[in-house]
Image (tube, helix red, strand yellow):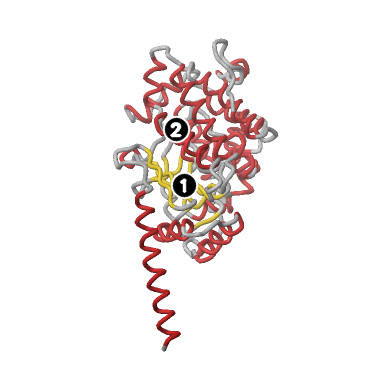
Amino acid sequence: VAVKYFIDNQRKIELKELQRARRQQQQTKTSFAGDDVLFERIGGAGIITLNRPSALNALNLSMIKKIFPKIKEWEEDPATTMIIMKGAGGKAFCAGGDILSITEEGKKGNYEAGQEFFRSEYQLNYRIATCLVPYIAFIDGITMGGGVGLSVHGENRICTERTLFAMPETAIGLFPDVGGSYFLPRLSKHLGMYLALTGFRLKGRDVYKAGVATRMVHSTVLPQLEQDLVAMENPSTQDITDLLRKYHEECQTGRERDYLILRDKEEDIKRMFCADSVEEIFENLRNDGSEWALEQLSVMEKMSPTSLKITHRQLSLGESLDLSECLEMEYRMGSQCLRHPDFYEGVRSVLIDKDKSPKWNPATLSGVTEGIVDKHFILPSDGEELQL
C-alpha cells in the first residue's frame, strides 16, 4: 500500500510539473496573430510558422527579414535542439514568393527592389542549408517556388497526402531558383529537368518518392509529431531521425500505389529530356508522337522560350556546382530577368489578368539567341555579386 501511495504521489507531482512546464511554454510565444511570421520557443525547439494563410503563406521580404536573424539567433544558442518550419492555415506550406511588388517596381525601372528580394531570399536559403542544428520542415499543402527554398535545403522535409510540389517558374518568365539548379539535377538528371521545364506537379507520396521529401506522414498526425519532437529532452540528431522514421513507417497513405506516378514514364522522360538543348527536347517529343509526349510538348509551348532556354543551361551547369555557386549563378539570372520583358508579361498573364495568354518576347525558341541566354548568366553592369 505504501509503495502504491508513493507511486501515485509521484505521478501527481510529475503531472503538476508537466502542467507547469506547459504554462511556461505558452508564455514563451513571442508573436501575435497579425504577424506574417510567428516565432515560438518550446524548450530547446524553435518553431517558425509562416502566417499568411489568405495568401497561401507566400513569402515576402518582411518575412525573410524576420526569419533570417531568428534562425541565426537560435542556432547560435547552445540550448537549441531543433528548428521547425511550418505554414498556417492547412492549405499551404508556402505557395511561392510574393513577387507582385517587385514587378510593380521593376516596371518603373527600379530593379533594386527585386534584387534585394532575391538577394535576401537566397541568403536565407543558404542559412537553412548550413543550419547548425537539425532543421525540420513540415511541407503540408502547396509547396512551390519560395516554399521549396524554405524546405528542400534542410535535412528533414516531411510531406503529407496534401503536399503539392512544383517549380512553375517558366510559366511566368523566370526559372526554378531558390537553389533549383542544385537540388533538381540531384533528384535525377532527367526528372529534375522535366519538373523544371514543364512545372509538373508532384502530389502526396510522390513528393517523397521523387526525393523532394525525406519522410511522409498523414496530415492529421502532424500536431502529435510536433508535440513529440518538442517534448524530447536534449535529443541527438539520431534521436530526431529515429522519431521521424517511426512516424514515416506508420504512415500507410499512398502505399497502395507504392511508386512514383511518373515511373512508368521514366524511360520516356530520360530518353526525351536528357538532351543538349530545348530544341532537341521539342524534337524528341514530336518524333515520339505519343499522347503523353504531345501533352508535354503542348505544356512547354506555352512557357516563355527564354525561360526554357536559360533553365536548361542553369540545370546543366548546376549539376557540377555546389549550392553557394548555384545561388550566386541564380542571383545573376534573377537580376537579368528583372530587365527582361517576359517576367512582367508572365506575372501579368498568370497572376494579374489571369488570362494565361502571354505574349513572349522573343516568341519562339529560334528567336532566343545564344547571346540572349549568355547575358542571363552575367551580372548587370550596375550590380554586385551575391554575398553568402
Number of numbered discs on residues? 2
Q: Can residue 295 be seen in this view?
A: no
Is 119 in front, or is 268?
Answer: 119
* Amino acid type of the residue tagged 2 in the rendering: Ile
Horizontal arrangement in the rendering, residue 101 relative to residue 365 (left or right): left
Give 7 or 123, whichever is nearer the viewer.
7
Residue displayed at 43% across by 79% down:
7
Rendered location of residue 367, percent (x, y): 55, 18
Residue at (46% x, 31% y) in the render = 171
Q: Quadrant of the N terminus?
A: bottom left
- Does residue 353 appear in this view? yes
Judge by depth and name the residue closer to the eye, 131 or 300: 131
For disc 1, the marked residue is 46
Quarter occupied by the C terminus: top right
Relative image position of residue 304 (x, y in whole percent): 49, 26
Please state which amino acid type lies under the numbered disc 1: Gly
Q: Earlier in the sequence, mark 1 or mark 2?
A: 1
**298 to 80, vertically: above or below:** above
